[in-house]
Every structure is written in C-alpha cells, then in structure tokens.
Image (tube, helix red, strand yellow):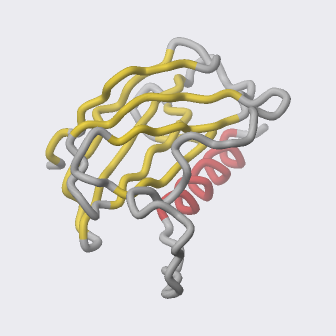
Amino acid sequence: MSPRLFALLGLSLLLAACSSQPEDDTPQASSPPSELTATAPSQPLQAGQRELRGNLLGAPANSEVELALLLVDARGRPRGELGTTRLLGNGQALPFSLRFVPQPFAPDLRVELRGRASQSGRLILRLPPRTLSGLDSQTLGTLQLVPAP
C-alpha cells in the first residue's frame, strides 16, 4: 500500500471517527439512562473479536464519553481505528467494554486507547493515551479522565 493511500485512508478514518451522528429525539424507555452504548454486551464475542474492559473515573453526569482504539505513528498521529464506543457519563465510575477485531499493521505503528469527554459540545476531559502491548482481550482496570487543555 503506498504511503499516500495509507495516509488518505487514515485521515478518512479519523474524520469518520470525529464526526458526530444526528441525535434521535425519540425517547428510549428500554435503555438505561447512564449509557449511550451497552457497557456489557449480552452477546458473546464473535470469532476473531477482542475486547477491552475497564472503568472510567471522572466523567460528570450527562457528559458524552468516546473511547477509541487507534493505530498511532511515532509522532502520535492517528493512522487508523480498530474500534470505538460511546458512553453517557453518570458522575460515578463508568464501566466500559470496547470490542474490536485485531488487524495487522506496520511495525512503526503502535496501538493506543484514547478517550475524550464533552458536555454541551465542549471538550472538558480527556483520557491520557494508553499504549497497549498486545491486541488480546484485556481488563485495563480503572482509568482516570483528566482536564482537557
């Protein structure tokens, strides 16, 4: 794959990851109010699928939290996305489950878990990038959100 094509693919994935989806105004009585996506999927992992689990601390009530598993180059720039999940903060420890399918990648890239929290469309907190040593299912424990610059 040529470097230009790889860069174009990475940028398009980044733009897709950053784009917001239109909000649905219909109330959902069956889903719990503390989550945008299920933190503990009821379905078992599919063949080849992996999962990261843990808890986030510091997400205020009604904040939108997005976690992404990214391929990152030596300069810290995202080059691809392996998985993403969105949650709704509840002011308490926020359990998460991020599913992904491992993919081969260039040796000069690394895998990082990154996160951000926003309220009323404004970035308020971030998860310091966490480099993962492998692409196996892992329990990451408790992760702390910090104020965004």
Q: Position of residue 131 (x, y in %)?
A: 43, 21
Which residue is most to the front?
30
Q: Position of residue 142 (x, y in %)?
A: 32, 25
Which residue is most to the bottom?
25
| Left or right of 79, for residue 117 | left
- Residue located at (52% from left, 74% from top): 29
- Residue located at (40% from left, 33% from top): 76
Quarter the N terminus occupies: top right
Q: Position of residue 13 (x, y in %)?
A: 61, 54
Q: Residue 100 sits in which quadrant?
A: top right
Q: Position of residue 94 (x, y in %)?
A: 35, 42
| Left or right of 48, for residue 64 | left
Question: Between residues 1 and 134, which one lies in front from this camera angle?
Answer: 134
Please give the count of numbered marks on the rendered protein. 0
Reply above or below: 119 against 136. below
- Residue located at (52% from left, 23% from top): 110
Q: Residue 117 sits in which quadrant?
A: bottom left
Question: Between residues 132 and 29, which one lies in front from this camera angle?
Answer: 29
Question: Between residues 14 and 123, which one lies in front from this camera angle?
Answer: 123
Reply above or below: 110 against 122. above
